Image (spheres, grey):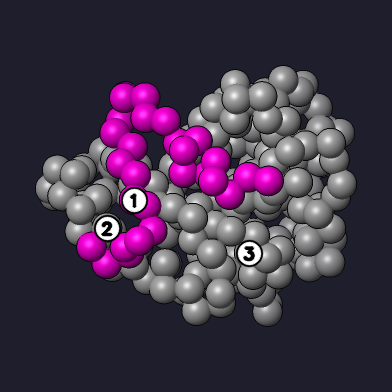
Amino acid sequence: MTTIFVTSSGTDIGKTFVTLQLIAELTSLGKRVRALKPVASGFDAAAADSSDSGLLLRAQHLDVTPATLDIVSPFRFAAPLSPDMAAARERRTISWPALLNACRAPTGADVTLIEGIGGVMVPLDSKHTVLDWIAALEAPALLVVGSYLGTLSHSLTAAAALHSRGVPLIGVVVSESPQQPVALEETVAALARFLDPIPVQPLPRGVFTPLAPLVAPHLS
């Protein structure tokens, strides 16, 4: 089984959209896909169906129930904050061993997609960040970034952080932002110059762009 971690340079950039598309594409290629978002903040139990966790479940043809939510997103918090802060509001913490075990649980899947939370350096608890999580799983990362003003620095910083911990970066997806200072292609070209030979894939809004070719070479 192959595990791929979908992370980002920040929050609300497109990780869930990319993960959902990968589920659909890989499934259409005959792969058995498991997708998880183990940590979710800003979770509203009354709107579970439309939450990121609910969308991932439905993409896997699973009902959205308390039991399935506990599998796909075992650490769910109401406050739309970093996980450490959101958990503190509920007098809870994220168990590091339990988090890793949830990601490593054996299944019959060919590939496990793990969607992170926020950006690479978001704190999970008093000691660990998302980067620590990715490194502990020894999983390759797919980095989702935007095309907004400032994304070049954010994206290259995220890539450098992954590199500093020896995390293989299999590709960068530039999800087109609602507002951008230059054409999407310019942002892609600028990132590609600094990240070569890592592939940088544009993802225009409203246009289907295959993403499976980015991850296919890394599937066992």
Q: Nearer the viewer, mark 1 or mark 3?
A: 1
Q: Crowdedness of circle 3 by 10 Å Cα count: few (<14), some, many (20+)?
A: many
- Residue 89's place in the image compared with 19, above or below, is below
Which residue position is annotated with label 1?
200
Left or right of residue 17, residue 83 in this image: right
Residue located 54% across and 64% down the image: 168
Q: Is residue 46 visible?
A: no
Q: Amino acid at mark 3?
A: Ile
Q: Are marks 1 and 3 in contact (CB under 8 Å)?
A: no
Which residue position is annotated with label 3?
134
Is residue 204 part of the magenta span, yes or no? yes
Work out how far the residue at label 1 is from the one at label 3, CA to CA, in angstroms. Answer: 20 Å
Q: Are marks 2 and 3 in contact (CB under 8 Å)?
A: no
- Residue 180's place in the image compared with 170, above or below, is above
Considering depth in this image, is 115 or 113 the residue closer to the camera?
Answer: 113
Q: Is residue 14 visible?
A: yes
Q: Earlier in the sequence, mark 2 or mark 3?
A: 3
| Residue 64 in the image, given as x and y percentages of width and height | 75, 25
Work out how far the residue at label 2 is from the one at label 3, CA to CA, in angstroms. Answer: 23 Å
Answer with the quarter of the image where residue 26 lies: top right
Residue located 71% across and 63% down the image: 137
Residue located 35% across and 61% down the image: 197
User: Which portion, as a residue range, is magenta?
Assistant: 193-220
Work out how far the residue at label 2 is from the one at label 1, CA to CA, in angstroms. Answer: 6 Å
- Residue 170's place in the image compared with 73, above or below, is below
| Residue 157 in the image, given as x and y percentages of width and height | 37, 71
Q: Nearer the viewer, mark 2 or mark 3?
A: 2
- Residue 107's place in the image compared with 198, above or below, is above
Q: Secondary structure at mark 1?
A: strand
Left or right of residue 175, residue 216 in this image: right
Q: Earlier in the sequence, mark 1 or mark 3?
A: 3
